[in-house]
Image (cartoon, grey):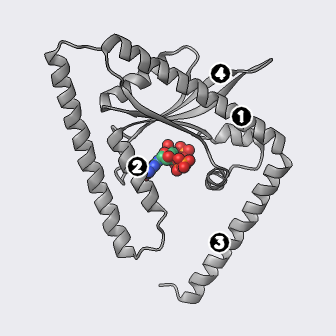
Amino acid sequence: MKNIREILKERRDEIFRLSILSEEFIAFIQANKRPVDRLMTYYRCAIMEVETKMKVLDEQFSLEYDRNPIESIKSRVKSMESLMDKMRRKNVSLSMEEIEAKIHDIAGVRVICSFPEDIYLLADCLLQQDDIRLIEKKDYISKPKANGYRSLHLIVEVPIFLQNEKRNMKVEVQFRTIAMDFWASLEHKLRYKKNLPQEMTQYLEQELYECAELSAGLDERMQRIRNLIAEEIGETVE
Ligand code: 0O2
């Protein structure tokens, strides 16, 4: 068991280490303002490309099958704070090339679907497109994370067309149902409540895990209801 002096020293060292890194990071961003702005603009363009592809698919499904598989789309370019945290975790050095090569989720598009089966349907449709290249796939739906987190993550490369150049940019596309998104949003908020007593944290983790299981059960039941209706009215999706 550590005494209070040791804990305080560790904490002080950690704060010192983080602040040095933060200062280096800020200096790097300031010294590379133009290239950083340019790269972030390229990521925003790549987000637009992926969003458009998803909206086109949604329109087509609406026309062909009279239903919209996408409930909503949320996109973001990673904040500088979150980028710095990740660079620290993955030991990425302060260079534009390293950042672009090793951080794959600077551009993020979250596609919220109505039903679990729509997730795989839309992901397949996206991956079939000849200008999309799959870099990595993480299926946290068939294999949820230990805390209960569910979502399908694809890292894809999509071209953006600039004045005199075509550039392939990486985008992380997360597919979730409304229930998965609801759970993940609340879990994300609770994760940053750091000052809770340890017994409470353990209890909350267990509660959150059980909520994730319950909401996965709900997703399954809603999917069954939809499939029964589709069968009854003779609706199929090729
Ligand atoms: P933010 O705020 O979304 O930018 P890797 O890059 O593969 O080495 P990483 O980044 O942990 O490692 O990959 P992973 O597992 O694919 O997770 C990336 C993103 O998925 C996270 O982004 C979250 O958006 C989401 N995510 C993953 N696990 C969880 C979880 O347990 N709970 C919640 N609520 N979201 C999760 P960032 O970078 O954390 O943040």
* Number of marks: 4
Mark 1: give few (<14), some (14-19) or many (20+) Cα within 10 Å. few
The foreground one among 122 and 128 is: 122
- The amino acid sitting under disc 4 is Pro
* Residue 156 position within the rendered picture, expressed as x and y whole percent measured from the top left: 56, 28
Label 2 with label 3: CB-CB less than 8 Å: no
- The amino acid sitting under disc 1 is Thr
Q: Quadrant of residue 144?
A: top left
Q: Disc 2 or disc 3, which is closer to the eye?
A: 2
Decide: is 160 above or below 39: above
Q: Which mark is residue 184?
A: 2
Mark 3 or mark 1: name the one nearer the start of the chain: 3
Tell me if residue 145 can be seen: no
Mark 2: give few (<14), some (14-19) or many (20+) Cα within 10 Å. some
Label 2 with label 4: CB-CB less than 8 Å: no
Q: Disc 3 or disc 4, which is closer to the eye?
A: 4
Q: CA distance from mark 3 to mark 1?
A: 33 Å
Q: Quadrant of residue 139?
A: top left
Q: Which mark is residue 159?
A: 4
Q: Disc 1 or disc 4, which is closer to the eye?
A: 1
Q: Which mark is residue 41?
A: 1
- The amino acid sitting under disc 3 is Glu
In the displayed structure image, the side of residue 201 where residue 106 appears, left or right = right
Q: Quadrant of the C terminus?
A: top left
Mark 2 or mark 4: name the one nearer the start of the chain: 4
